[in-house]
Amino acid sequence: MVSQTRIILNTKIDSWRSGCLLACLLLAACATPERPVVPVPIPVAPPAVSVPVPPRLGLALGGGAARGFAHVGVIQVLEEAGLRPDLVVGTSAGSLVAVLYASGRTGAQLQQVAEGMDEAAFTDWTLPLFNRGVLKGEALARYVNAQVGNRLLEQMAMPVGVVSTRLDTGEGVLFQRGDTGTAVRASSAVPAVFLPVRINGAEYVDGGLVAPVPVRYARRMGADVVLAIDISAATEGNPSADPLQMLMQTFAIMGKSINRWELQEADVVVRPPLASMSGADFASRRRAIDAGRTAMLRLLPQLKAAMAAKTK
């Protein structure tokens, strides 16, 4: 009897265990229903948008003494058209306008400086006269530094270069660092008019001897599009007996020869109509500014086309 009772009991226990296991399986199945596998989409990057990169516009301001006021008119037209150069480089008179512009002056402010400029402020005679030059040039350097707040070339609001000529080697030199007034003085040191300028043991004279319009130097500074302003005087037949007129005629002949190949590297060349204005005619500064405006307005479509063609 005991054995049968144990068998019956064991059978009931086994049945109870089986029932519990089946219940657990059913509960587990009800608690965690099977869910469909949904693929997660991989994010697709939007197509790259090509943003046009405008070319770097460089101004190359040529030399020409009082004719250099025409540079101001050109700059005014560029501002009115919404075109701001990325860099500027100048020779001789162009170097003066270049550093004033690079210091942050607007076209209107440049005109105010031009109209208030007194050329007598640059007149510091050497003693004895004609001792390698009749003017020292120190007054010009002081004037420039006062106008730019005594900032160095590398401290300007815009990259600026000043071109001069090393007297002993005849090589062109691009100043981009150092004393601004000294660099402009060196770039403007017309032989026999201004004394050569000594910098770090070497003497420097007018940059127009190597680059009347410094197009190559604008390229060297990184310009993609070069706007060259040529204010060089035309040759005018036999000069008078005045030694200064003879010297200016010599510079005009030399500049014309150099510019034949220098200006070929420019994208746009502006030639303000100043045929009858001499480099010593400081009284005609307003006329020179207007001539610069007239010439730049005419070539504005050409400049915009050149900028568009080199937009990356």
Image: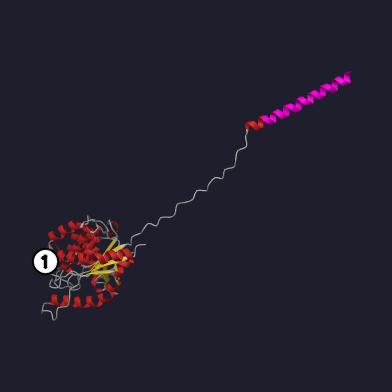
Point out residue 264 in the picture as x, y percentages from the top left corner: 29, 74
Q: Residue at x 18, y 63 (%)?
A: 73
Point out residue 117 in the picture as x, y percentages from the top left corner: 13, 61
Q: Quadrant of residue 113?
A: bottom left
Looking at the image, the residue that sits furthest to the bottom is 238
Local SS, label 1? helix
Q: Which residues are magenta?
A: 1-26
Residue underneath mark 1: 284
- Where is the N terminus found, in terms of image quarters? top right
Q: Nearer the viewer, residue 132 or 266?
A: 266
One can see residue 57 in this view? yes
- Where is the C terminus found, in terms of image quarters? bottom left
Point out residue 179 in the picture as x, y percentages from the top left corner: 26, 60
Q: Residue at x 16, y 59 (%)?
A: 111
Asked whether 86 falls inside the magenta stretch, the response is no
Q: Magenta region, mostly helix, strand or loop?
A: helix
